[in-house]
């Protein structure tokens, strides 16, 4: 099918590349000419595992190209809107890019086309979009509208595209849902050739959920908000564990074995970040408010999350006493591993607090340093985890990159000023770290002091 994907961000570019990979002819559009040129030359605007290979293969074969929106939509049979919906100051989603794209589609699409809303939007946006398309439609244009919320996670977006748990469609006409079924058929039937593994690990057919557009839009916001709620819940349990002398990793393990609860998203730490959860929780609170529902539960989820950074800094303060003049190594800047995205990353908020108190920060992240440096230019960015730890009074783990688990602890011990690790993600192999004579402080009681604590921490 001839598909246009509007927006070359995390969702749009991944979607465009993967649609091309399963055989469609795709034009990916953006209003940023510089980004389009960069993409035409094969340069990725962000890091996402496997994406570069898929883009490169499909641009070479001619199934994927990049263009401005006006040209991309002309002749497309399906148009996916994947532009950003950033938060406004009052928490509402800013829909100006979505509205702008709707007008461009109405004036430039031709014949019949299915317009699919993939951006995360408040409930009833599809109805508004439909009205906009009708109001601005050029002569002869016939449009259908559907909602198809996205559940990709940054860092595993390619895997998530090919192996979704469910594909949700909101459509008021059966024909629209059928057209989307045709587009997704290789995924639904799991008949695609895996672009990542020679043998695909899982081949479970995803659920196919068709609803009205309002329900489909709500599924997205409710899902993200529920996951955020799980994180804030386990973060409170972690605080309780610390207070009473329990270990949250064991509590979460025991809870997660109940299939009604599930073990996913029960990792406590410095809180959720990124461009989705923080803004989606706020937007969902606003949607409820405007509809006369006080979603107090979600307000608390946001409040708990905001408190995580201060609580973590307080823990560091407790260990280091005065922060002024101390050297602190920060391992991890991205809001989660396998991405270079630092938007609403708790690591950056923590660094700003440490800086404000006069600490010297030496940071390392395998992918996110370029983007972090634009936000915080005045700390030392180091080429690896060891360099960041040189002379440090404490090593803080703020993103759970795999490489931090495999550090040579003896080598690290020789470099640091003091053998103290504060693990904001419970990411490191605790026993191994402690066996190498480090004082380890995790989240929620996952802390341990080595047998030789007194002599080693006095170094
Ligand atoms: C999230 C959802 O998981 C996706 O399904 C959705 O498509 C996406 O938002 C979106 O709306 O576009 P993403 O933001 O990429 O995906 O990342 P997650 O893996 O969900 O993590 C979000 C944040 O929660 C991260 O800061 C992560 O560190 C934190 N988190 C996650 C925890 O603190 N604990 C956990 O147990 C899980």
Image (cartoon, rainbow, N blue to C red):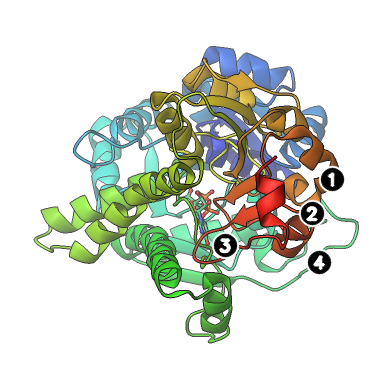
Q: CA distance from mark 2 to mark 1?
A: 7 Å
- Residue 181 got which mark? 3
Residue 21 horizontal/vertical position (percent): 74, 45
User: Foreground residue, 127 or 110?
Assistant: 127
- Residue linked to disc 4: 201
- Residue 335 got which mark? none
| 310, above or below 242, in the image | above
Q: CA distance from mark 3 to mark 2?
A: 55 Å
Q: Secondary structure at mark 4?
A: loop
Q: CA distance from mark 4 to mark 2?
A: 36 Å
Residue 329 location, quadrant: top right
- Residue linked to disc 2: 436
Residue 312 horizontal/vertical position (percent): 44, 48
Nearer the camera: disc 3 or disc 2 = 2
Look at 49% across and 21% down and name the residue there: 376
Quadrant assignment for the C terminus = top right
- Residue 410 got which mark? 1
Nearest to N terminus: mark 4 or mark 2: 4
Q: Is residue 297 left or right of residue 98?
A: left
How would you rate the neighbour count of disc 1 (Cα within 10 Å): few for under 14, some for 14-19, many for 20 or more?
Answer: few
How would you rate the neighbour count of disc 2 (Cα within 10 Å): few for under 14, some for 14-19, many for 20 or more?
Answer: some
Nearest to N terminus: mark 3 or mark 2: 3
Residue 390 location, quadrant: top right
């Amino acid at each position: 099918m001839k598909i246009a994907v509007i927006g070359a961000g995390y969702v749009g570019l991944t979607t465009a590349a993967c649609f091309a990979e399963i055989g469609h002819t795709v034009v990916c559009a953006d209003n940023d000419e510089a980004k389009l040129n960069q993409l035409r030359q094969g340069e990725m605007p962000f890091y996402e595992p496997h994406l570069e290979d898929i883009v490169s293969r499909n641009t070479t074969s001619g199934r994927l190209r990049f263009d401005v929106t006006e040209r991309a939509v002309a002749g497309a049979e399906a148009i996916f809107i994947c532009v950003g919906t950033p938060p406004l100051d009052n928490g509402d989603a800013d829909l100006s890019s979505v509205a702008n794209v709707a007008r461009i589609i109405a004036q430039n699409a031709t014949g019949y086309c299915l317009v699919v809303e993939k951006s995360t939007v408040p409930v009833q946006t599809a109805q508004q979009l439909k009205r906009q398309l009708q109001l601005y439609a050029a002569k002869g244009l016939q449009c259908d509208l559907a909602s198809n919320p996205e559940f990709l996670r940054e860092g595993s977006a390619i895997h998530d595209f090919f192996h979704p748990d469910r594909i949700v469609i909101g459509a008021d006409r059966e024909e629209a849902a059928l057209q989307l079924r045709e587009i997704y058929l290789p995924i639904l039937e799991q008949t695609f050739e895996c672009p990542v593994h020679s043998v695909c690990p899982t081949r479970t057919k995803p659920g196919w959920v068709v609803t009205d557009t309002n329900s489909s839009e709500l599924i997205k916001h409710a899902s993200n908000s529920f996951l955020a709620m799980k994180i804030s819940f386990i973060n409170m349990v972690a605080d309780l564990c610390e207070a009473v002398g329990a270990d949250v990793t064991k509590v979460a393990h025991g809870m997660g074995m109940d299939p009604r609860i599930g073990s996913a998203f029960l990792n406590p730490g410095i809180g959720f970040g990124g461009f989705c959860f923080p803004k989606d929780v706020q937007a969902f609170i606003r949607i409820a408010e405007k509809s006369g529902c006080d979603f107090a539960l979600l307000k608390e989820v946001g409040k708990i999350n905001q408190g995580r950074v201060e609580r973590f800094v307080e823990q560091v303060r407790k260990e280091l006493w005065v922060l002024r003049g101390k050297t602190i190594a920060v391992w991890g800047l991205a809001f989660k591993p396998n991405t270079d995205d630092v938007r609403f990353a708790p690591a950056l908020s923590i660094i700003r607090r440490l800086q404000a108190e006069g600490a010297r920060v030496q940071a390392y992240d395998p992918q996110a340093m370029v983007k972090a440096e634009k936000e915080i230019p005045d700390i030392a960015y180091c080429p690896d985890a060891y360099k960041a730890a040189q002379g440090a009074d404490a090593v803080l783990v703020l993103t759970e990159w795999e490489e931090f688990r495999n550090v040579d602890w003896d080598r690290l011990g020789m470099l640091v000023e003091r053998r103290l690790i504060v693990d904001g993600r419970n990411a490191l192999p605790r026993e191994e770290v402690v066996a190498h004579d480090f004082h380890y402080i995790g989240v929620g009681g996952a802390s341990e002091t080595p047998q030789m604590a007194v002599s080693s921490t006095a170094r």
